Image: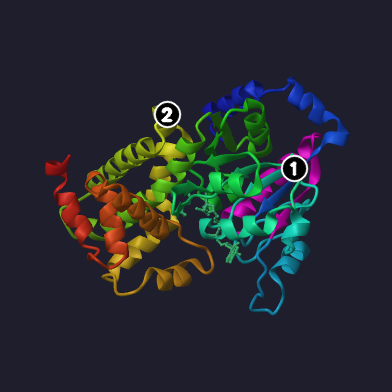
Amino acid sequence: MAPALEAQVQEEEQSLPQNNNFYNSLNDATHRSKVTVIGSGNWGSVASKLIASNTLRLASFHDEVRMWVYEETLPSGEKLTDVINRTNENVKYLPGIKLGQNVVADPDLENAVRDSNMLVFVTPHQFVEGICKRLVGKIREDAEAISLVKGMEVKMEGPCMISTLISQQLGINCSVLMGANIANEIAVEKFSEATVGYRNNREVAERWVQLFYTPYFIVTAAQDVEGVELCGTLKNVVAIAAGFLYCFVDGLEMGNNTKAAIMRLGLREMKAFSKLLFPSVKDSTFFESCGVADLITTCLGGRNRKVAEAYARNGGKRSFDELEAEMLQGQKLQGVSTASEVYEVLSHRGWLELFPLFSTVHEICSGLLPPSAIVEYSEKLPRSF
Ligand SMILES: NC(=O)c1ccc[n+]([C@@H]2O[C@H](COP(=O)([O-])OP(=O)(O)OC[C@H]3O[C@@H](n4cnc5c(N)ncnc54)[C@H](O)[C@@H]3O)[C@@H](O)[C@H]2O)c1
Ligand SMILES: O=P(O)(O)OC[C@H](O)CO
């Protein structure tokens, strides 16, 4: 690691809370926290690896980390869970990376959460509600949750953030962790940052920071659950726009400045949408890792951007589902469904004209407009903004 970063890491480690009552009680072996990771995809596996390195190191956690696996049979005929437990690798979603011997894969959801008081949700957002329904009455009453899930649901009553869904269904508090976190980079311990968003209990936020923080994964806390979560959710829609646009950039008179313009305009819509939904969202949140940094990394190297670029290259003739299956092999995109969920909110509230980028993305994804419409959108930018 570069010396400047190393110094920053040391400084941040020293600033981590050490001596408050919350930690003192947890340092008692009888109060050790037990952690379950609900999800074992690409990011779920990396999150398990990060957590497992800390639960071994810190006395206030049980060493073992349970990782719930949505079971599947591999082409070899073996169960994914069995292979993870035999090889210590998630050979399908994170091949080549050892998770840590203290990670135990478990296909039984109820068993996986038994006795755990720290629940880490990290599945594609479309599966969270079904998982929560199965967990009702099965978790500890004093459990705390954190969501690493980037996405939202739209209900009859209006938009519902995933952390709210978890809180409401399970009757527990739910924080969030979002950031510029392309999982494959963190898996090989490349330096990254993340933001924990919390509601009002700073000690709980610090506990989550402690669970995830490593010298190569710097985590800071922000008291703005909705702001942090909306950043992580909405940047996926901008990444789809970036993918469409990047397909055309080289053939047209567009360059890096154009790529940057779509990110800036996307950030503006992210901020405006977040604040319209939740006036409490703080401006400062957009400058944390969960904000501008996540937007940049996703538009540069994320799955949403790559698949959207392929969609545009094929002139919209191959569906997102088909491209997702071919390019991601079981991993899931969040941006297309999030664009649809955002569009539903915009239409319902009469805000479509306020969000031309978000609207155009959904209209392209749903086949109402051709992918080239993103170029026309971009050419109108000087007049629109
Ligand atoms: N991968 C990343 O780089 C990354 C980084 C940060 C945040 N995230 C976010 O984390 C969340 C999880 O992403 P991921 O990369 O871990 O997953 P992934 O994209 O690898 O998704 C596949 C996972 O979904 C599971 N799955 C498939 N069908 C299921 C079902 N019916 N019920 C439950 N699970 C099912 C699969 O078993 C697998 O574990 C997403 O919201 C994503 O946006 C991902
Ligand atoms: O690969 P994506 O597009 O799902 O993005 C991954 C992460 O969210 C980046 O922080």
Q: Determine the secondary structure under disc 1.
A: loop
Q: Contact, CB < 8 Å: mark 1 with mark 2?
A: no
Percent x, y of residue 99 = 70, 53
**Which residue is labeled 1 in the image?**
141
Work out whether residue 117 can be spotted.
yes
Q: Determine the secondary structure under disc 2.
A: loop
Q: Residues within 10 Å of mark 2 (few under 14, many from 20)?
A: some
Which residue is rendered at x = 75% and y = 53% of the image?
A: 138
On residue 282, the disc is 2
Relative to 122, say whether 205 is above or below. above
| Quadrant holding the N terminus | top right
* The residue stretch that appears in magenta: 39-68
Please say whether residue 64 is one of the residues in the magenta stretch: yes
Please say whether residue 206 is one of the residues in the magenta stretch: no
Question: Is disc 2's CB within 8 Å of ligand 2?
Answer: no
**Three-letter code, disc 1:** Glu
Residue at far front of view: 157
Which residue is rendered at x = 57% and y = 34% of the image?
A: 218
Q: Residues within 10 Å of mark 1 (few under 14, many from 20)?
A: few
Front residue of 362 and 311? 362
Work out whether residue 188 can be spotted.
no
Q: Nearer the viewer, mark 1 or mark 2?
A: 1
User: Is 90 on the left-hand or right-hand side of 258?
Assistant: right
Q: Quadrant of residue 295?
A: top left
